[in-house]
Image: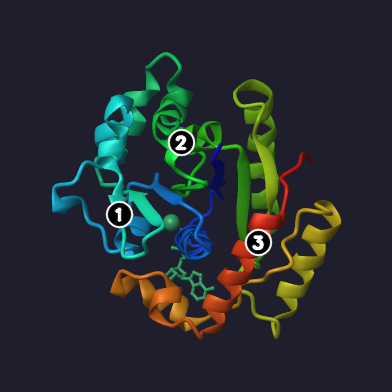
Amino acid sequence: MARQIVIANQKGGVGKTTTAVNLAACLAVMEKRVLLVDCDPQANASSGLGTYAEDGNLNLYSVLFQPEKGTQAIVPTALPFLSIIPSSQDLVGAELELADKLGREFYLRDLMESVSRDFDFIILDCPPSLGLLTVNALCAATELLIPLQCEYYAMEGIAQLLKTFTLVRRRLNPTLALLGVVLTMYDKRNRLSGQVKNEVRRTLPNFLFDTVVPRNVRLSEAPSFGKPVISYDIKSVGATAYLQLAQEVVRRKAGTV
Ligand code: ADP
Ligand code: MG
């Protein structure tokens, strides 16, 4: 069965998409069969891998309400072991359309059930909110990975996310477990970075990834070439970090808090 990992944090700009794309790509070069699912209407993960809605492909929105067509929305990428279900702006409407549906939290889960058998890993990239799309992703996954930027209020954000995690576990998806927190855009010269790191270690012992993703300009340049960082600059510290994170993800078991 595929390991289904949701990358979530309701804050924007904390490195969700960068982590989703590069973790997916690094697992793929380890010859794991990976499906990246772009659940954000902003479609940054899709464009970051060079896929665009206007290519005429089916996308997440077009198959969300017809899971039997799910496999038709899977698009190959330049990496042989990596495929993607791209997003599009239409997905904004999905949030509204889901709102008055019975079982509105489980549409993505049903879709994933129809496509997961061909993959070792499914990586779900979320929008920056705790709305229905994120809740759908939390219900479709078995593991939660939280990217955290070391800034003021980072811990408040995490507390709110963990509250949602606990609620989802209790009410909607008891199989969801916490895989871990990964620090992103880390700057070891910044004192706040060290403080946030210690705080995560204290409040979530066993859930802090050893891998820390440093701030690295290669990581921010790669998407404009439609490439994950390992294809853009394999020698960069960003590439090294995500290769290391992928190895940790393969070894690590998710747990409960
Ligand atoms: P989110 O998906 O949480 O909104 P992104 O992954 O899109 O966050 O990251 C926000 C911005 O920061 C993007 O421009 C991205 O390229 C940049 N970025 C993310 N991680 C890093 C990093 N480790 N080093 C430098 N820039 C980064
Ligand atoms: Mg994003």
Query: What's the CA distance linking mark 2 and mark 1?
Result: 16 Å
Query: What's the CA distance linking mark 1 and mark 3?
Result: 27 Å
- The label on residue 239 is none
Q: Residue at 42% of width from left, 31% of height from top?
A: 108
Tag 1's secondary structure?
Answer: strand
Left or right: where 197 falls relative to 24: right
Pick out the residue farthest to the top.
102
Tag 3's secondary structure?
Answer: strand
Q: Nearer the viewer's eye, disc 1 or disc 3?
A: 1
Is residue 7 visible to us here? yes
Q: Residue at 31% of width from left, 59% of height from top?
A: 77
Disc 3 crowd, CA 10 A, few/some/many (<14, 14-19, 20+): many
Q: Which residue is mark 3?
A: 182
Kind of residue at disc 3: Val
Q: Residue at 36% of width from left, 61% of height from top?
A: 80
- Sequence-first disc among 2 and 1: 1
Left or right: where 248 falls relative to 24: right
Q: Nearer the viewer, residue 220 or 46?
A: 46
- The label on residue 117 is 2
Kind of residue at disc 2: Arg
Disc 2 crowd, CA 10 A, few/some/many (<14, 14-19, 20+): few
